[in-house]
Protein backbone atom coordinates (compact mmCIF):
# COMPACT_ATOMS: atom_id res chain seq x y z
CA UNK A 1 0.00 0.00 0.00
CA UNK A 2 1.37 3.43 -0.97
CA UNK A 3 2.20 5.89 1.76
CA UNK A 4 0.12 9.10 1.89
CA UNK A 5 1.73 12.15 0.24
CA UNK A 6 3.61 14.90 1.99
CA UNK A 7 1.69 18.18 2.02
CA UNK A 8 3.09 21.35 0.41
CA UNK A 9 5.37 22.36 3.28
CA UNK A 10 8.45 24.55 3.60
CA UNK A 11 11.81 22.94 4.34
CA UNK A 12 15.01 24.67 5.39
CA UNK A 13 18.38 23.29 6.51
CA UNK A 14 19.30 24.15 10.11
CA UNK A 15 22.25 23.40 12.36
CA UNK A 16 21.51 21.57 15.59
CA UNK A 17 24.29 20.46 17.96
CA UNK A 18 26.81 20.60 15.12
CA UNK A 19 24.73 18.53 12.70
CA UNK A 20 22.57 19.48 9.74
CA UNK A 21 18.85 18.81 9.96
CA UNK A 22 15.89 19.88 7.89
CA UNK A 23 13.13 21.92 9.52
CA UNK A 24 9.62 21.47 8.13
CA UNK A 25 7.02 24.19 8.62
CA UNK A 26 3.45 24.63 7.41
CA UNK A 27 3.14 27.77 5.23
CA UNK A 28 -0.64 27.72 5.69
CA UNK A 29 -0.27 27.89 9.47
CA UNK A 30 -2.70 25.07 10.18
CA UNK A 31 0.14 23.29 11.97
CA UNK A 32 2.18 25.59 14.17
CA UNK A 33 4.69 23.01 15.37
CA UNK A 34 7.89 22.49 13.42
CA UNK A 35 9.44 19.10 12.68
CA UNK A 36 13.18 18.46 12.56
CA UNK A 37 14.33 15.61 10.31
CA UNK A 38 17.71 14.06 9.72
CA UNK A 39 18.92 14.11 6.09
CA UNK A 40 17.87 10.48 5.66
CA UNK A 41 14.44 11.09 7.17
CA UNK A 42 14.04 14.19 5.03
CA UNK A 43 14.79 12.12 1.93
CA UNK A 44 12.03 9.73 2.95
CA UNK A 45 9.63 12.62 3.51
CA UNK A 46 10.46 14.16 0.13
CA UNK A 47 9.81 10.78 -1.52
CA UNK A 48 6.22 10.65 -0.27
CA UNK A 49 4.23 11.56 -3.38
CA UNK A 50 1.23 9.31 -2.77
CA UNK A 51 2.38 6.60 -5.20
CA UNK A 52 5.35 5.02 -3.40
CA UNK A 53 5.24 2.16 -0.92
CA UNK A 54 8.13 1.00 1.27
CA UNK A 55 9.91 -0.88 -1.53
CA UNK A 56 9.72 2.12 -3.86
CA UNK A 57 11.07 4.49 -1.18
CA UNK A 58 13.86 2.05 -0.32
CA UNK A 59 14.87 1.64 -3.96
CA UNK A 60 14.83 5.41 -4.46
CA UNK A 61 17.18 5.72 -1.50
CA UNK A 62 19.52 3.05 -2.87
CA UNK A 63 19.58 4.76 -6.28
CA UNK A 64 20.44 8.08 -4.68
CA UNK A 65 22.98 7.04 -2.06
CA UNK A 66 24.11 3.53 -3.07
CA UNK A 67 23.28 2.13 0.35
CA UNK A 68 20.50 -0.21 1.40
CA UNK A 69 20.00 0.83 5.00
CA UNK A 70 16.32 1.80 5.20
CA UNK A 71 14.32 -0.64 7.31
CA UNK A 72 10.57 -0.86 6.84
CA UNK A 73 9.90 -0.08 10.51
CA UNK A 74 12.09 3.03 10.27
CA UNK A 75 10.28 4.33 7.19
CA UNK A 76 6.89 3.63 8.77
CA UNK A 77 8.02 5.47 11.90
CA UNK A 78 8.92 8.55 9.84
CA UNK A 79 5.56 8.41 8.06
CA UNK A 80 3.68 8.05 11.35
CA UNK A 81 5.66 10.94 12.88
CA UNK A 82 4.82 13.23 9.96
CA UNK A 83 1.15 12.22 10.06
CA UNK A 84 0.87 12.81 13.80
CA UNK A 85 2.13 16.35 13.29
CA UNK A 86 -0.21 17.10 10.38
CA UNK A 87 2.35 17.16 7.58
CA UNK A 88 0.75 14.47 5.41
CA UNK A 89 -2.39 14.77 3.28
CA UNK A 90 -4.51 12.45 5.40
CA UNK A 91 -7.80 12.59 7.30
CA UNK A 92 -5.79 13.56 10.39
CA UNK A 93 -4.64 16.77 8.68
CA UNK A 94 -8.11 17.48 7.29
CA UNK A 95 -9.46 17.35 10.84
CA UNK A 96 -6.73 19.75 12.02
CA UNK A 97 -7.47 22.14 9.14
CA UNK A 98 -11.23 22.07 9.60
CA UNK A 99 -10.88 22.82 13.31
CA UNK A 100 -8.61 25.79 12.50
CA UNK A 101 -11.09 27.10 9.92
CA UNK A 102 -14.01 26.69 12.32
CA UNK A 103 -12.19 28.51 15.12
CA UNK A 104 -11.22 31.36 12.79
CA UNK A 105 -14.77 31.75 11.48
CA UNK A 106 -16.14 31.98 15.01
CA UNK A 107 -13.51 34.42 16.31
CA UNK A 108 -14.83 38.00 16.12
CA UNK A 109 -11.34 39.47 15.59
CA UNK A 110 -8.22 38.44 13.78
CA UNK A 111 -6.07 37.56 16.77
CA UNK A 112 -2.49 38.81 17.17
CA UNK A 113 -0.81 35.66 15.94
CA UNK A 114 2.80 36.77 16.46
CA UNK A 115 2.38 38.58 19.80
CA UNK A 116 4.86 37.15 22.28
CA UNK A 117 7.05 35.56 19.62
CA UNK A 118 7.59 38.04 16.77
CA UNK A 119 7.31 41.01 19.13
CA UNK A 120 6.50 41.59 22.82
CA UNK A 121 2.97 40.75 23.82
CA UNK A 122 2.86 43.11 26.81
CA UNK A 123 1.83 46.69 25.83
CA UNK A 124 4.52 48.68 27.67
CA UNK A 125 7.28 46.36 26.50
CA UNK A 126 5.95 46.55 22.95
CA UNK A 127 5.91 50.36 22.97
CA UNK A 128 9.51 50.44 24.16
CA UNK A 129 10.46 47.80 21.58
CA UNK A 130 8.91 49.76 18.70
CA UNK A 131 10.20 53.13 19.89
CA UNK A 132 13.71 51.70 19.80
CA UNK A 133 13.52 51.27 16.02
CA UNK A 134 13.16 55.00 15.51
CA UNK A 135 16.31 55.87 17.43
CA UNK A 136 18.41 52.84 16.39
CA UNK A 137 21.39 53.35 14.08
CA UNK A 138 19.49 51.90 11.12
CA UNK A 139 16.39 53.98 11.90
CA UNK A 140 15.61 57.65 11.19
CA UNK A 141 17.19 58.82 14.48
CA UNK A 142 14.10 60.46 15.95
CA UNK A 143 10.74 59.33 17.28
CA UNK A 144 7.43 60.70 16.00
CA UNK A 145 6.41 63.66 18.12
CA UNK A 146 2.86 64.25 19.27
CA UNK A 147 1.37 67.40 17.79
CA UNK A 148 4.09 67.83 15.16
CA UNK A 149 2.21 66.23 12.30
CA UNK A 150 1.02 67.98 9.18
CA UNK A 151 -2.54 67.84 7.93
CA UNK A 152 -2.30 66.09 4.56
CA UNK A 153 -1.77 62.33 4.82
CA UNK A 154 0.55 60.61 2.39
CA UNK A 155 -1.19 59.10 -0.62
CA UNK A 156 0.93 56.01 -0.18
CA UNK A 157 4.03 54.44 1.30
CA UNK A 158 5.93 51.21 0.71
CA UNK A 159 7.24 49.62 3.90
CA UNK A 160 8.79 46.18 4.58
CA UNK A 161 7.10 43.19 6.15
CA UNK A 162 10.28 41.39 7.21
CA UNK A 163 10.41 40.48 10.91
CA UNK A 164 10.89 43.43 13.22
CA UNK A 165 14.20 42.17 14.58
CA UNK A 166 15.86 42.43 11.18
CA UNK A 167 13.92 45.30 9.64
CA UNK A 168 12.54 47.41 12.48
CA UNK A 169 14.60 50.44 11.51
CA UNK A 170 13.21 50.33 7.98
CA UNK A 171 9.64 50.27 9.33
CA UNK A 172 10.50 53.34 11.39
CA UNK A 173 11.62 55.34 8.35
CA UNK A 174 8.30 54.84 6.59
CA UNK A 175 6.07 55.37 9.60
CA UNK A 176 7.91 58.52 10.70
CA UNK A 177 7.17 60.04 7.31
CA UNK A 178 3.54 58.95 7.57
CA UNK A 179 3.14 60.63 10.96
CA UNK A 180 4.93 63.78 9.84
CA UNK A 181 2.61 64.17 6.84
CA UNK A 182 -0.54 63.75 8.92
CA UNK A 183 -2.41 60.74 10.24
CA UNK A 184 -4.92 59.25 7.79
CA UNK A 185 -8.38 58.24 8.92
CA UNK A 186 -8.18 54.96 7.02
CA UNK A 187 -5.39 52.91 5.44
CA UNK A 188 -5.82 50.56 2.51
CA UNK A 189 -3.19 47.88 3.23
CA UNK A 190 -1.94 45.50 0.57
CA UNK A 191 -0.07 42.57 2.12
CA UNK A 192 1.53 39.49 0.62
CA UNK A 193 -0.36 36.22 0.99
CA UNK A 194 2.66 33.95 1.50
CA UNK A 195 0.36 30.92 1.62
CA UNK A 196 -0.34 31.46 -2.11
CA UNK A 197 -4.15 31.22 -2.27
CA UNK A 198 -5.60 30.65 -5.76
CA UNK A 199 -7.34 34.05 -5.97
CA UNK A 200 -5.61 37.37 -6.74
CA UNK A 201 -6.95 39.13 -3.62
CA UNK A 202 -8.30 37.83 -0.30
CA UNK A 203 -10.37 40.00 2.02
CA UNK A 204 -11.47 39.84 5.64
CA UNK A 205 -13.99 41.85 7.61
CA UNK A 206 -12.33 41.01 10.92
CA UNK A 207 -10.81 43.71 13.11
CA UNK A 208 -7.11 43.20 13.92
CA UNK A 209 -6.21 42.60 17.54
CA UNK A 210 -2.88 43.99 18.75
CA UNK A 211 -1.38 44.28 22.25
CA UNK A 212 -1.96 48.05 21.88
CA UNK A 213 -5.66 47.71 21.14
CA UNK A 214 -7.91 46.57 18.33
CA UNK A 215 -7.38 48.17 14.92
CA UNK A 216 -10.81 48.39 13.32
CA UNK A 217 -11.48 47.22 9.79
CA UNK A 218 -13.71 49.52 7.72
CA UNK A 219 -16.57 47.15 6.95
CA UNK A 220 -18.23 49.34 4.29
CA UNK A 221 -15.02 49.69 2.32
CA UNK A 222 -14.33 45.95 2.48
CA UNK A 223 -17.87 45.33 1.22
CA UNK A 224 -17.31 47.77 -1.67
CA UNK A 225 -14.21 45.86 -2.73
CA UNK A 226 -15.96 42.51 -2.28
CA UNK A 227 -18.69 43.58 -4.69
CA UNK A 228 -16.06 44.16 -7.38
CA UNK A 229 -14.63 40.64 -7.13
CA UNK A 230 -15.20 38.08 -9.85
CA UNK A 231 -14.38 35.41 -7.24
CA UNK A 232 -15.35 34.83 -3.61
CA UNK A 233 -12.86 37.07 -1.77
CA UNK A 234 -13.62 35.35 1.55
CA UNK A 235 -13.28 31.75 0.36
CA UNK A 236 -9.66 31.62 1.54
CA UNK A 237 -10.02 34.14 4.37
CA UNK A 238 -8.21 31.66 6.64
CA UNK A 239 -4.87 32.80 5.12
CA UNK A 240 -5.26 36.04 7.11
CA UNK A 241 -5.06 34.00 10.31
CA UNK A 242 -1.30 33.51 10.37
CA UNK A 243 -0.12 36.01 7.74
CA UNK A 244 2.34 38.51 9.20
CA UNK A 245 2.44 41.02 6.33
CA UNK A 246 -0.67 42.88 7.54
CA UNK A 247 -0.34 42.05 11.25
CA UNK A 248 3.03 43.82 11.51
CA UNK A 249 1.55 46.94 9.84
CA UNK A 250 -1.47 46.90 12.15
CA UNK A 251 0.84 46.82 15.18
CA UNK A 252 2.90 49.75 13.86
CA UNK A 253 -0.22 51.74 13.05
CA UNK A 254 -1.66 51.15 16.50
CA UNK A 255 1.62 52.45 17.92
CA UNK A 256 2.19 55.58 15.84
CA UNK A 257 -1.27 56.48 14.51
CA UNK A 258 -3.37 55.59 17.53
CA UNK A 259 -6.49 53.52 18.10
CA UNK A 260 -8.82 55.50 15.83
CA UNK A 261 -7.18 54.61 12.51
CA UNK A 262 -9.15 52.12 10.41
CA UNK A 263 -7.76 49.69 7.87
CA UNK A 264 -8.92 47.90 4.74
CA UNK A 265 -6.83 44.68 4.81
CA UNK A 266 -6.18 43.06 1.43
CA UNK A 267 -3.87 40.09 0.90
CA UNK A 268 -2.45 39.71 -2.59
CA UNK A 269 -2.07 36.34 -4.22
CA UNK A 270 -0.39 35.78 -7.56
CA UNK A 271 -1.81 37.46 -10.64
CA UNK A 272 -0.71 38.84 -13.99
CA UNK A 273 -1.88 42.39 -14.71
CA UNK A 274 -3.42 43.27 -18.05
CA UNK A 275 -4.09 46.42 -20.02
CA UNK A 276 -7.81 45.75 -20.10
CA UNK A 277 -10.43 43.71 -18.30
CA UNK A 278 -8.34 40.73 -17.28
CA UNK A 279 -9.83 37.24 -17.24
CA UNK A 280 -9.43 37.03 -13.46
CA UNK A 281 -11.10 40.39 -12.80
CA UNK A 282 -7.95 42.08 -11.47
CA UNK A 283 -8.64 45.28 -13.40
CA UNK A 284 -12.18 45.52 -12.06
CA UNK A 285 -10.86 45.11 -8.50
CA UNK A 286 -8.22 47.78 -9.11
CA UNK A 287 -10.92 50.15 -10.41
CA UNK A 288 -12.79 49.67 -7.13
CA UNK A 289 -9.63 50.47 -5.17
CA UNK A 290 -9.12 53.62 -7.22
CA UNK A 291 -12.69 54.72 -6.42
CA UNK A 292 -12.06 54.26 -2.71
CA UNK A 293 -8.92 56.38 -2.92
CA UNK A 294 -10.67 59.13 -4.92
CA UNK A 295 -13.72 59.20 -2.65
CA UNK A 296 -11.49 59.48 0.43
CA UNK A 297 -8.95 61.94 -0.93
CA UNK A 298 -7.07 63.58 1.91
CA UNK A 299 -8.31 60.97 4.39
CA UNK A 300 -6.84 57.71 3.10
CA UNK A 301 -3.31 56.38 2.68
CA UNK A 302 -2.37 53.24 0.76
CA UNK A 303 0.34 51.00 2.23
CA UNK A 304 2.25 48.28 0.41
CA UNK A 305 3.61 45.80 2.94
CA UNK A 306 6.39 44.57 0.70
CA UNK A 307 9.83 43.06 0.85
CA UNK A 308 11.92 42.93 -2.30
CA UNK A 309 14.53 40.36 -3.38
CA UNK A 310 15.03 36.93 -1.79
CA UNK A 311 18.36 35.52 -2.98
CA UNK A 312 20.61 32.71 -1.75
CA UNK A 313 20.59 29.04 -0.84
CA UNK A 314 17.67 29.49 1.55
CA UNK A 315 15.57 30.40 -1.48
CA UNK A 316 16.88 27.80 -3.91
CA UNK A 317 19.90 29.54 -5.46
CA UNK A 318 23.14 27.62 -5.81
CA UNK A 319 25.39 30.48 -4.76
CA UNK A 320 27.12 32.02 -1.79
CA UNK A 321 26.30 35.56 -0.79
CA UNK A 322 29.19 37.84 -1.75
CA UNK A 323 29.71 41.58 -2.11
CA UNK A 324 29.14 41.16 -5.85
CA UNK A 325 25.84 39.33 -5.30
CA UNK A 326 24.67 42.05 -2.93
CA UNK A 327 25.65 44.75 -5.43
CA UNK A 328 23.89 42.94 -8.30
CA UNK A 329 20.71 42.64 -6.24
CA UNK A 330 20.89 46.30 -5.27
CA UNK A 331 21.37 47.42 -8.86
CA UNK A 332 18.38 45.42 -10.13
CA UNK A 333 16.19 46.47 -7.20
CA UNK A 334 16.90 50.14 -7.77
CA UNK A 335 16.26 49.81 -11.50
CA UNK A 336 12.86 48.33 -10.74
CA UNK A 337 12.07 50.85 -8.02
CA UNK A 338 12.71 53.67 -10.47
CA UNK A 339 9.38 52.69 -12.06
CA UNK A 340 7.74 52.94 -8.64
CA UNK A 341 9.13 56.45 -8.20
CA UNK A 342 7.49 57.34 -11.51
CA UNK A 343 4.18 55.82 -10.43
CA UNK A 344 4.37 53.30 -13.28
CA UNK A 345 2.63 50.17 -11.99
CA UNK A 346 2.81 48.13 -15.18
CA UNK A 347 6.39 49.24 -15.85
CA UNK A 348 7.41 48.04 -12.38
CA UNK A 349 5.73 44.68 -12.90
CA UNK A 350 7.34 44.19 -16.31
CA UNK A 351 10.78 45.21 -15.02
CA UNK A 352 10.66 42.64 -12.22
CA UNK A 353 9.40 39.96 -14.59
CA UNK A 354 11.99 40.71 -17.30
CA UNK A 355 14.04 37.82 -15.89
CA UNK A 356 11.00 35.85 -14.68
CA UNK A 357 11.43 37.38 -11.23
CA UNK A 358 14.71 35.59 -10.65
CA UNK A 359 15.21 37.56 -7.41
CA UNK A 360 11.83 36.41 -6.04
CA UNK A 361 10.48 39.89 -5.30
CA UNK A 362 7.66 38.80 -3.01
CA UNK A 363 6.13 42.28 -2.88
CA UNK A 364 5.60 42.36 -6.63
CA UNK A 365 1.81 42.15 -6.63
CA UNK A 366 1.15 44.35 -3.60
CA UNK A 367 3.43 47.14 -4.89
CA UNK A 368 1.67 46.91 -8.25
CA UNK A 369 -1.73 47.06 -6.52
CA UNK A 370 -0.68 50.09 -4.48
CA UNK A 371 0.49 52.01 -7.54
CA UNK A 372 -2.65 51.08 -9.48
CA UNK A 373 -4.85 52.20 -6.60
CA UNK A 374 -3.17 55.61 -6.65
CA UNK A 375 -3.62 56.17 -10.39
CA UNK A 376 -5.78 59.23 -10.87
CA UNK A 377 -5.05 60.52 -7.36
CA UNK A 378 -2.87 63.53 -8.06
CA UNK A 379 0.57 63.51 -6.48
CA UNK A 380 1.31 66.37 -4.09
CA UNK A 381 5.04 66.09 -4.62
CA UNK A 382 7.74 63.81 -6.02
CA UNK A 383 8.01 60.23 -4.79
CA UNK A 384 11.08 59.54 -2.68
CA UNK A 385 13.16 56.47 -1.90
CA UNK A 386 13.69 57.04 1.82
CA UNK A 387 16.01 54.11 2.46
CA UNK A 388 17.09 50.78 0.98
CA UNK A 389 18.89 47.94 2.72
CA UNK A 390 19.01 44.17 3.15
CA UNK A 391 19.20 41.58 5.91
CA UNK A 392 20.76 38.14 6.04
CA UNK A 393 18.55 35.08 6.24
CA UNK A 394 19.70 32.51 8.82
CA UNK A 395 19.15 29.75 6.26
CA UNK A 396 21.68 31.32 3.90
CA UNK A 397 20.70 34.28 1.75
CA UNK A 398 19.60 37.90 1.82
CA UNK A 399 16.28 39.72 1.76
CA UNK A 400 16.19 43.32 0.52
CA UNK A 401 13.64 45.95 1.49
CA UNK A 402 13.16 49.68 1.92
CA UNK A 403 10.70 52.55 1.92
CA UNK A 404 9.24 54.69 -0.82
CA UNK A 405 7.07 57.66 0.11
CA UNK A 406 4.34 58.65 -2.34
CA UNK A 407 3.09 62.15 -1.32
Image (cartoon, rainbow, N blue to C red):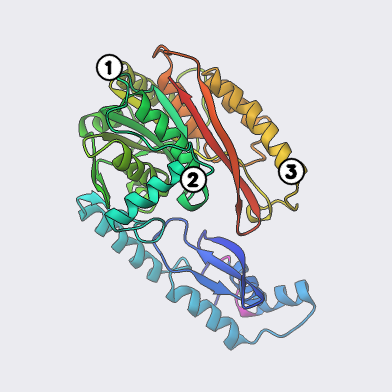
Question: Residue, x 47% and y 35% (percent of image)?
Answer: 173
Q: CA distance from mark 1 to mark 2?
A: 38 Å
Residue 88, relative to residue 158: is it above or below?
Answer: below
Q: Earlier in the sequence, mark 2 or mark 3?
A: 2
Label 1 element class:
helix
Q: CA distance from mark 2 to mark 3?
A: 27 Å
Q: CA distance from mark 3 to mark 1?
A: 44 Å
Instruction: Count every numbered label the image shows and give the total.
Output: 3
Q: Quadrant of the N terminus?
A: bottom right
Q: Which residue is mark 2?
A: 136
User: Where are the magenta residues, as a range?
Assistant: 49-54
Residue 119 falls inside the magenta stretch: no
Query: Percent position (x, y) of residue 189?
Result: 37, 34
Query: Percent position (x, y) of residue 352?
Result: 62, 31
Q: Quadrant of the C terminus?
A: top left
Comparing labels 2 and 3, the label whose residue is closer to the camera: 2
Q: Which mark is residue 295?
A: 1
Of the pair 208 and 92, the residue shown nearer to us: 208
Q: Earlier in the sequence, mark 3 or mark 1?
A: 1
Q: Is residue 93 visible?
A: yes
Q: Are marks 2 and 3 in contact (CB under 8 Å)?
A: no
Q: Which residue is mark 3?
A: 325
Residue 174, relative to residue 400: is it above or below?
Answer: above
Please name the predominant secondary structure of the magenta segment in the image: loop
Amino acid sequence: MAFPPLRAVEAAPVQHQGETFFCLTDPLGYVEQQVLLSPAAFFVAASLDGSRDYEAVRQEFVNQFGRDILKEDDVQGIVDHLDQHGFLATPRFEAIAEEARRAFRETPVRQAHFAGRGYPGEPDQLREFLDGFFTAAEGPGVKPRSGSAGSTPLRGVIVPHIDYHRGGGAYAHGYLRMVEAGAPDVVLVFGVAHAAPPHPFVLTRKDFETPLGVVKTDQAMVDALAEACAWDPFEHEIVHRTEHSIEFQAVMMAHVLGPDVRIVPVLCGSFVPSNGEGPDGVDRFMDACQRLVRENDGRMSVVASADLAHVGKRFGDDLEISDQVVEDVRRRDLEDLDHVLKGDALGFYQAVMADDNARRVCGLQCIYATLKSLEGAGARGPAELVNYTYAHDPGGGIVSFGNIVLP
